[in-house]
């Protein structure tokens, strides 16, 4: 029994156990929860991905004492069920694309994006804790594509969770919309808003800010700052190193909110043999600029071929910042409020040298380079990759080509995390390679399935009335 406790990165929220952190998402002081210490990796079990997942996450999850706490047998069963939804016998297979160059395919889950790895588990964790406590939640969220479908699929079988996802009418791709609107479960509701993605996000924020509404419906979110999502993503780093024979490995990660690459940093803190973590940005390169200059400077967002990485501020960066500040919540909170008011945040050279320089590298990749990388990989290995994955491959290749890095990196395998299936982004794939990427068999009839959605005006009262009407 570990009974891990969790603290907020802003130092003002109560310390909680795993089940409460799971349901809370954000801490009451606006911070993000992190465990009080990083446990060491266990000796790894032989066997499938689900067994590895249960072993790696065990010290974070297994507790007893309070209603809803999760025991070992229940957790193993949840891992088994979650990863049984992946349609590849290796769950997250490694594919070689060049000398010392690999891709880890994280997209064999139900919605074809890496977010399934975490959300298939998180949905099951939510249902377990809620049913033990005899509670229900209403998850509300806004999506511009990937997150909504992965969240819906993660909770569609949950008895104690309802979900309402808002998306901008006419502004998400056919595949992305249908992955949400064709899910036939009584607890799943999609709403087409007559507006933009920002309008949808504003409506969701306004619902959370309405304390009476929030409490009445027990509103909840499963966004990427939820600790359980980050935790579930540490596992595939360990799996990749294990598959490559337990040698030092570098990872290149197409990055948006910094959740995925942060999970790699945590795996390294736990003892995984990670050499460097390469942060791949598209034209929205706030993180790459940070790792080059030690300064975070906010800038506008521009649309790119890799839309799931079109972000202005990476919310999970706060967890790394907290470490850089030697876990001082007050300093972290102060830096973040300065960043909110001035759009700038700088860290001291020694903080950067201790925490970031030994591990993180960064590169950027614009749309042109994204397309040419997709074309290169197709020509070299016959493999179609999606535009997000291409940003990762390009970042890895740019850094490998850098002179001062050759000695250090020679012989170290680089694994790029493939975050989406190419069929999720057919237009970019066709543009780069001339080849139409086919949907996998289980989704082959997606474009013929009946859709179920609701059109609601871009108006808070109308959306709230809708959410009330579907609450069970
Ligand atoms: C969400 C997403 C990303 C970005 O991941 P972060 O954890 O936010 O850095 C990259 N690629 C795809 C396909 C995604 O859906």
Image (cartoon, helix red, strand yellow):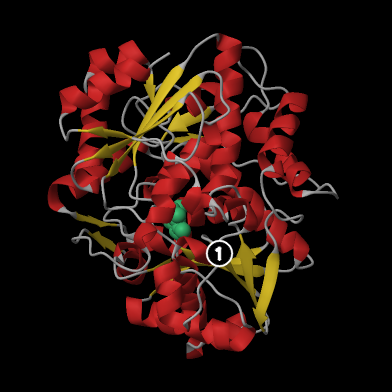
Q: Quadrant of the N terminus?
A: top right
- Percent across and percent down for residue 75 are 70, 29
Quarter location, residue 343: bottom left
Q: Is residue 449 visible?
A: yes
The residue at label 1 has a CB less than 8 Å from ligand 1: no
- Percent across and percent down for residue 312 are 26, 56
Residue drawn at (52%, 41%), measured in percent from left and top?
229
Q: Toward the viewer: 118 or 160?
A: 160
- Relative to 217, say whether 314 is above or below: below
Q: Which residue is at the far bottom?
A: 403
For label 1, count other residues whose C-alpha is less than 10 Å away and answer few (under 14), some (14-19) or many (20+): many
- For disc 1, the marked residue is 418
- Percent across and percent down for residue 434 are 47, 82
Q: Toward the viewer: 229 or 302?
A: 302
Q: Quadrant of the C terminus?
A: top left
- Percent across and percent down for residue 71 are 72, 22
Q: Which residue is at the far right?
A: 46
Tally the marks: 1
Q: Secondary structure at mark 1?
A: strand
- Lateral position of residue 74 relative to residue 156, left or right: right
Q: Tell me the quadrant of ligand 1.
A: bottom left
Q: Toward the viewer: 407 or 76?
A: 76
- Lateral position of residue 102 relative to residue 391, left or right: right
Q: Toward the viewer: 74 or 10?
A: 74
Residue drawn at (43%, 81%), measured in percent from left and top?
432
Q: Is residue 36 visible?
A: no
- Lateral position of residue 221 relative to residue 51, left or right: left
Quarter location, residue 30: top left
Quarter location, residue 344: bottom left
């Amino acid at each position: 029994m570990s009974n891990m406790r969790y603290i907020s990165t802003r130092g003002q929220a109560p310390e909680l156990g795993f089940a409460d952190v799971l349901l809370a998402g954000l801490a009451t002081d606006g911070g993000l929860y992190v465990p009080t210490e990083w446990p060491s990796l266990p000796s790894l079990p032989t066997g499938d991905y689900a067994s590895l997942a249960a072993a790696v996450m065990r010290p974070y999850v297994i507790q007893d004492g309070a209603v809803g706490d999760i025991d070992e047998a229940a957790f193993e069963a949840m891992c088994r069920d979650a990863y049984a939804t992946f349609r590849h016998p290796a769950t997250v297979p490694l594919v070689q694309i060049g000398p010392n160059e690999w891709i880890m395919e994280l997209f064999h889950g139900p919605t074809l994006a890496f977010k399934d790895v975490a959300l298939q588990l998180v949905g099951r964790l939510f249902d377990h804790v809620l049913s033990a406590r005899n509670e229900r939640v209403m998850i509300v969220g806004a999506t511009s594509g990937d997150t909504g479908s992965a969240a819906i699929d993660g909770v569609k079988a949950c008895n104690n969770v309802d979900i309402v996802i808002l998306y901008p009418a006419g502004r998400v791709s056919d595949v992305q919309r249908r992955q949400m609107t064709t899910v036939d479960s009584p607890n799943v509701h999609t709403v087409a808003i007559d507006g933009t993605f920002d309008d949808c996000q504003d409506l969701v924020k306004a619902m959370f800010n309405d304390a009476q509404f929030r409490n009445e419906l027990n509103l909840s979110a499963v966004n990427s700052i939820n600790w359980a999502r980050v935790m579930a993503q540490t596992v595939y780093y360990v799996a990749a190193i294990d598959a490559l024979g337990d040698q030092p490995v570098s990872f290149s990660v197409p990055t948006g909110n910094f959740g995925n690459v942060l999970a790699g940093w945590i795996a390294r803190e736990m003892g995984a043999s990670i050499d460097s973590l390469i942060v791949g940005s598209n034209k929205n390169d706030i993180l790459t600029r940070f790792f080059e200059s030690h300064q975070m400077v906010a800038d506008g967002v521009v649309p790119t071929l890799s839309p799931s990485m079109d972000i202005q501020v990476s919310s999970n960066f706060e967890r790394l910042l907290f470490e850089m500040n030697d876990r001082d919540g007050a300093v972290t909170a102060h830096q973040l409020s300065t960043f909110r008011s001035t759009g700038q945040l700088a860290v001291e050279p020694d903080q950067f040298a201790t925490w970031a320089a030994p591990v993180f590298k960064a590169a950027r990749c614009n749309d042109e380079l994204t397309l040419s990388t997709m074309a290169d990989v197709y020509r070299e290995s016959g493999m179609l990759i999606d535009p997000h994955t291409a940003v990762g491959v390009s970042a890895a290749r740019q850094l490998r080509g850098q002179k001062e890095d050759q000695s250090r990196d020679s012989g170290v395998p680089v694994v790029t995390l493939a975050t989406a299936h190419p069929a999720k982004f057919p237009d970019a794939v066709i543009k780069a390679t001339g080849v139409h990427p086919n949907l996998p068999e289980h989704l082959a009839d997606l474009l013929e399935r009946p859709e179920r959605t609701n059109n609601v005006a871009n108006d808070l009262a109308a959306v709230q009335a809708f959410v009330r009407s579907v609450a069970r």
